[in-house]
Amino acid sequence: MSVKIWLKAIRVPFFTATIIPVILGSTIAWHDTDSFMWLRFWLTMCAALLIHAGTNLANDYFDHLSGCDEVNPAPTPFSGGSRVIQEGSIAPKKILYVSLASFILGGAVGLYLNYLSQGNTILILGIIGVSLGFFYSAGPFRIGYGSLGELAVGVGFGPLMILGSYYVQAQVLPFKVFLISLPIGILIALVLFINEFPDYFADNLVGKRTQVVILGKKKAVILYHILLSTVYLVIISLVLLKFLPFICLIVLLSLPLALKAFLVSKKNFNKTYELLPANAFTIGLHSLIGLLLVAGIILDKII
C-alpha cells in the first residue's frame, strides 16, 4: 500500500487548518515574552497534526459506517471524504486502527508537553481537542451529525489550538489570546460550512443535521456571507481595542479573495461544481488571513 494513498486518506492538503493556528499562537507568545522555544513549537505542531490526522481518518471510518459517503452522488476534492474506503484502497478497519494510533501518539506528545508545562492546562485542552476530533463522527455523540458540528470544528481548530500553542511557550493564558483566536476559528468553521453545500443531499439522506441541511442552501449561504464579514469586523475591532497591533490591518489585503468567495457562493450556492472555487477561496482565506496576522505581529515586534 503506497504512502500516497495514506496521504490521501489523512487529507494532507487540509493540514493548513492545524499549521496556521499553531504558528499564530506561538508567534503571539513570542511577541509577548521575547522568547521562542523551538523544541516545544515542533512538539506542539507534531501533536496537533497527529490529532488532526486521527480526526480525518475517524471521520472517514464513521461516515462509512453511517453510509454517508457511500450515498454521496457528487463527491468533490473538498467534500465527501477521502474516498479511499469507497475506492477499496484501504480497508475500513485499517483506517480505524491508524486513526486510533494517531490519537494515541498525538496524546503521548501532548502529555509530554503537559509535563514540561505548569499545571494541567495542556492536558485539559488536549482532552477537549481529542474528544472533539474523535466524537465528531463517532458515537455516542456524533457531533458532526448534529447542529453543533461547525462550532466544534471552529473551537477545535481555532481557540483550542491557538491557546494551547501560546501556553506551551508562555505558560499563561491572557484573555486577549482567546479573542485573537476567534477570526481563525470562524474561518475554519466556514471552510467546513461551505464544504457542506455539495454534501447536502447525502447528509440529508442519512440524517446528518448540518447547518446547511437545517437552514437549506439559500439561507445557509446568507449565514456564510455574514460570518465572512464578521471575520473582518472582529479583526478591525481587535486592532481598535489594541489587542492586535495596528499593522495587523494588512489582513485587509485579503479582501479581493473574500469578494471572490462572496460572489461565487452567491451565484452558485445551489450548484456543486460551479461552487468549488468558493470552497478553494475559503480555504485560501483561512491560510492567507492567518499568515497576514502572523506577519503583522512579527513586523510589530521587529520594527
Image (cartoon, rainbow, N blue to C red):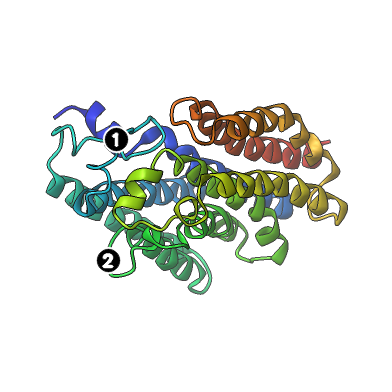
Q: Position of residue 92 (x, y in %)?
A: 15, 46
Sooner in the amino-acid sequence: mark 1 or mark 2: 1
249 vs 223, left or right, is right
Helix, strand or loop status at disc 1: loop
Helix, strand or loop status at disc 2: loop
Residue type (three-letter) at the residue carrying disc 1: Pro
Residue at image point 54% right, 36% down? 269
57 vs 199, left or right, is left
Q: Is 65 or 95 nearer to us in this picture? A: 65
Q: Residue furthest bottom?
A: 119
Q: Position of residue 67 (x, y in %)?
A: 22, 49
Which image quadrant for residue 255?
top right
Which quadrant does the N terminus fall into?
A: top left
Q: Which mark is residue 277?
A: none
220 vs 98, left or right, is right
Viewer can see residue 293: yes
Residue at image point 82% right, 39% down? 247
Q: Which residue is mark 1?
A: 73
Between the residue at mark 1 and the residue at mark 2, the CA separation in whole angstroms equals: 25 Å
Residue type (three-letter) at the residue carrying disc 2: Gly
Q: Position of residue 29 (x, y in %)?
A: 66, 53
Viewer can see residue 37: no
Residue at image point 78% right, 42% down? 301
Q: Is 49 or 283 nearer to us in this picture? A: 283
Crowd rating for badge 1 (residues with CA inside 10 Å; few <14, some 14–19, many 20+): few
Q: Position of residue 248 (x, y in %)?
A: 78, 41
257 vs 84, left or right, is right
Crowd rating for badge 2 (residues with CA inside 10 Å; few <14, some 14–19, many 20+): few
Q: Is 64 or 217 nearer to us in this picture? A: 217
Mark 1, mark 2: which one is toward the viewer?
1
Which quadrant does the C terminus fall into?
A: top right
Q: Which residue is mark 2?
A: 139
